Image (cartoon, rainbow, N blue to C red):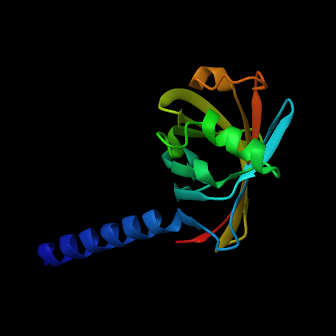
Amino acid sequence: MKKIVNTGLFAAIISFCAFTFFAGNWKIKESGASVKFSGGKISGSFETLRADIQFDKNQPEQAKISATIDVNSIATGFFIKTNHAKDALGADNYPTIKFVSTSVSKDGVGYVAKGNLTMKGATKPATIHFTFDDKGSEGVFKGSFKVIPKDYGIDRSGTPDDVTIDLIVPVTKA
């Protein structure tokens, strides 16, 4: 009898843990995400964002976020500026920009993801303030943060002192 109770308890715990893990996994909707940047005389967007998002608004401290942007997906609206931006970001040698969270916490009405941002081969700490609009099986992450290009070895004529990155990431349950 004791074995049956222990086995049943073990099965219930495993089932609950599996549900908890599944409940917080999100994937970017096919309609895509918006990654826009602006600073000084430059503005534009990145067209390709991939992300692994494990997030539960009730337990943000257990969240894990990993996102990758294809540098060659940059668009400024003018091909010469786009080519200059690709060169400045070192697209040939460093084809991706990557963010990996080290912690996520509640902050007022939103959240804060701290982590490491890697661009052009340089990795620096980054902090992204974001909100999450949860609609059950769907949701939208909206965030913003600043980057200082010189910190990443991006220092061409016309490069602004800082660039604001704005994110809108519609997601569905994975």
The answer to whether residue 59 is seen in the rendering is no
Residue 91 lies in what quarter of the image?
A: top right
Q: Considering depth in this image, is 38 or 157 the residue closer to the camera?
A: 157
Q: Is residue 42 above or below residue 82?
A: above
Q: Considering depth in this image, is 116 or 159 the residue closer to the camera?
A: 159
Q: How many labels does the image show?
A: 0
> Residue 9 location, x and y as percent?
27, 70
- The N terminus: image quadrant: bottom left
The residue depicted at 72 percent of the width and 70 percent of the height is 135
> Residue 41 location, x and y as percent?
87, 33
Q: Considering depth in this image, is 76 or 26 the residue closer to the camera?
A: 76
Decide if residue 128 is on the left or right side of residue 36: left
Q: Considering depth in this image, is 82 or 124 the residue closer to the camera?
A: 82
The residue depicted at 44 percent of the width and 70 percent of the height is 19
> Residue 25 location, x and y as percent?
51, 64
Decide if residue 3 is on the left or right side of residue 130: left
The answer to whether residue 77 is seen in the rendering is yes
Q: Is residue 45 above or below residue 129?
A: below
> Residue 85 location, x and y as percent?
69, 39
Q: Is residue 13 above or below residue 115?
A: below
The residue depicted at 70 percent of the width and 38 percent of the height is 84
